[in-house]
């Protein structure tokens, strides 16, 4: 069977997942995890890619990368080969460490980018390992908090934090609030299960949905805030919350209404 060609990102940003062969553990102790992080750092030193987020689980890894000098496939090949060599040598084994091909999905806009970061950092929470992403040592979450935020971080967090605020302290505060929001983020492995449920997956799709709704009801965006249009406004908010992974902050920004108004519409 011919392999399906990997979808290319117009932004160069990809959410990547690599999994252990036959879903076996790829990290058997903390030294293994440290080694993998060191490999990530070594491979990005020559500006081969930017790293926006990572999370190391027992049998898989989530990465959010932006390709720079070389394409994502070459970068991942280097990372995987380096770690597999270390792992096989340490544990005196032979054979594949990772499944044959890494999984990837393109990230085409800022809303989706932030959702992917939130999903990656909350992976250990959803798995029941910790109650807060801050409690998990093996992810990039701490590099976004006030404690871990520094210019020498392995993670290129400044680009992301500037989306929240130019003031670093305020940006960190808003990032943490966003990360801890209740959400239904689903990616890669879970995508097929949720495909029918969530049909608005990008910022452009959300704007198109809003435009269609407004045209159907002969309204302009600024008119949605009027008291007489409250019922239609609530209907639109409800549809966006049900059919997308948009946060309250995202919906508020798109509709140019307060977060409180969005939050008060119950799903």
Image: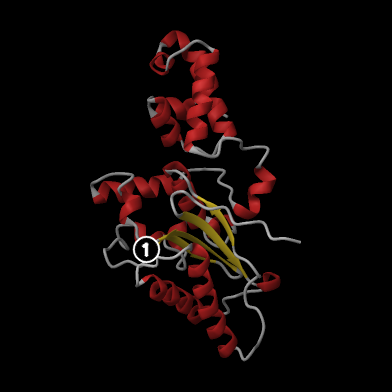
What residue lies at 52% left-to-right and 51% top-to-bottom?
106
Q: Is residue 225 above or below residue 196?
A: above
Number of on-image labels: 1
Q: Is residue 248 above or below residue 65?
A: above
Q: Is residue 40 above or below residue 172?
A: below
What residue lies at 40% left-to-right and 12% top-to-bottom?
226
Sort mark 1 into few (<14), some (14-19) or many (20+) by Cα contacts within 10 Å.
many
Residue ranking furthest to the top: 228
> Residue 93: where, in percent of width, then height?
65, 88
> Residue 135: where, in percent of width, then height?
45, 62
Q: In the picture provided, is 154 more to the left or to the right than 243?
A: left
> Residue 154: where, in percent of width, then height?
36, 67
Closer to the camera in the image, 202 or 124:
202
Closer to the camera in the image, 64 or 194:
64
Closer to the camera in the image, 109 or 29:
109
What residue lies at 55% left-to-right and 14% top-to-bottom?
216
Q: In the picture provided, is 129 more to the left or to the right than 149?
A: right
Residue 224 appears in the rendering: yes
Residue 131 appears in the rendering: no
Query: Which residue is under mark 1?
Result: 155
Q: Secondary structure at mark 1?
A: loop
Look at the image and tell me in which quarter the C terminus lies.
Answer: top right
Q: In the picture provided, is 248 more to the left or to the right than 148?
A: right
């Amino acid at each position: 069977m011919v392999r399906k060609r990997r979808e290319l990102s117009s932004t160069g940003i990809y959410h990547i997942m690599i999994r252990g062969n036959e879903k076996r553990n790829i990290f058997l102790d903390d030294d293994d995890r440290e080694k993998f992080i060191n490999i990530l750092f070594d491979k990005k030193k020559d500006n081969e890619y930017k790293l926006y987020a990572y999370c190391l689980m027992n049998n898989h890894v989530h990465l959010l990368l932006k390709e720079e000098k070389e394409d994502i496939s070459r970068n991942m090949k280097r990372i995987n080969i380096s770690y597999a060599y270390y792992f096989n040598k340490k544990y005196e084994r032979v054979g594949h460490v990772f499944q044959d091909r890494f999984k990837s999905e393109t990230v085409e806009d800022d809303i989706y980018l932030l959702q992917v970061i939130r999903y990656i950092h909350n992976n250990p929470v959803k798995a029941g390992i910790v109650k807060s992403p801050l409690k998990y040592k093996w992810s990039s979450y701490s590099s976004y908090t006030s404690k871990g935020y520094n210019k020498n971080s392995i993670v290129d967090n400044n680009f992301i934090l500037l989306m929240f605020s130019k003031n670093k302290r305020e940006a960190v505060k808003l990032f943490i609030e966003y990360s801890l929001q209740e959400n239904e983020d689903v990616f890669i492995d879970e995508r097929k299960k949720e495909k029918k449920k969530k049909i608005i997956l990008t910022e452009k799709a959300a704007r198109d949905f809003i435009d269609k709704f407004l045209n159907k009801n002969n309204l302009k965006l600024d008119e949605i805030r009027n008291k007489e249009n409250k019922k239609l406004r609530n209907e639109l908010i409800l549809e966006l919350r049900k059919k997308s992974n948009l946060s309250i902050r995202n919906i508020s920004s798109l509709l140019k209404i307060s977060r409180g108004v969005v939050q008060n519409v119950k799903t």
